[in-house]
Image (cartoon, rainbow, N blue to C red):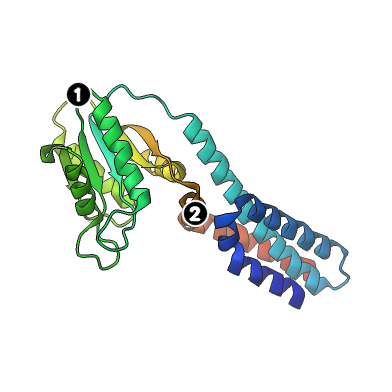
Amino acid sequence: MVVVTIIEATIIYRIRFVYSRHPMGAISLSLFTVTIFYLISKFTLNKFVRAYTFGFATINLIFLIVMLAYMWQMDRDLKNLQSMKGTDFLLVLGNKCMGNRIQPILAGRLDKAIELYSDFVEKPQIIVSGGKSQKNAKTESELMREYLLERGIPKEMIVVENKSVNTIQNLEFSAIKIHKIWQEKFRPRVIIVTSDYHIPRTKVQAKRLGLRVNFAAAKTVKMLKWPAMFREFTAIIWYHRYSLITILGMDILFSLSMYL
């Protein structure tokens, strides 16, 4: 039991570090740990150790499956992105800023929006969405607006949404602004611009907006992409925490039944 606990604690403590540098290595390590734990639970004679190890193995397996499902969905979504001939709005989702400057991930999103804006004959309005990050004097959207202005986007083409603090609010508050601005009878076309790793979670939330939505993915350099993907994985876990808690509760009950 002590050995199993030490292994589990070490993995929990180090898995983000490992995944951020060698994602395939982290996945292989997780799979190896799950296999070892299941083997221990199968062949040990002590019922308590069997139940204890089986419970950890199942928890690790659930998290591994969620991670692999997220990675598969991201790859699938990026391959299925459609070419875009026009749009009414470009919605650029914010990203945490450390200090009053644009970070590389957010700069990538804004550069992608500028690229799309330049390609369209009929220019869409660009909505920059994001509230304050930590105790910065400026909101993310203010910094984003300044970035666009410095690169030649007319100020009348920029709409600022400065209240949101997470992805769900980015989408919901921006959708409210779009519905207030839009005067036509048909639904507006919206391209949501975000990072490649962020597409799966954004697509799930965007279905609720009542808009015609498409997506554009800004590429993220590998050095930043893998840590961001791990954060995205933890966000997905949090969004589905109640379902996962139910599954984990069932796992605990099943593990206890092995001891009784």
> What amino acid is labelled 2 in the image?
His
Q: Position of residue 166 (x, y in %)?
A: 34, 55
User: Which residue does the image show at 57% across and 40% down from the upper left?
Assistant: 72
Q: Residues within 10 Å of mark 1 (few under 14, many from 20)?
A: few
Q: Is residue 207 above or below residue 59?
A: above
At horizontal 31% and vertical 50% (from top left) the residue drawn is: 94
- Compared with 186, 58 (above or below) is below
Q: Residue furthest left?
A: 156
Q: Please name whichever residue, 112 or 39, is drawn nearer the observer in this view of the structure.
A: 112
What percent of the width, then of the height, locates residue 134? 29, 66
Furthest toward the bottom, the residue is 2
Identify the residue at horizontal 73%, vertical 60% (top origin). Answer: 33
Q: How many marks?
A: 2
Q: In the rendering, at what x and y percent does residue 30 appear? A: 68, 57
Q: Amino acid at mark 1?
A: Glu
Reply above or below: 67 against 45: above
Q: Is residue 100 left or right of 239 when viewed as pictured?
A: left
Helix, strand or loop under label 2: loop
- Which is more foreground, mark 2 or mark 1? 1
Left or right of 110? Residue 43 is right
- Disc ID at residue 122: 1
Q: Which residue is mark 2?
A: 240
Q: Are marks 2 and 1 in contact (CB under 8 Å)?
A: no
Secondary element type, mark 1: loop
Which quadrant is home to the N terminus? bottom right
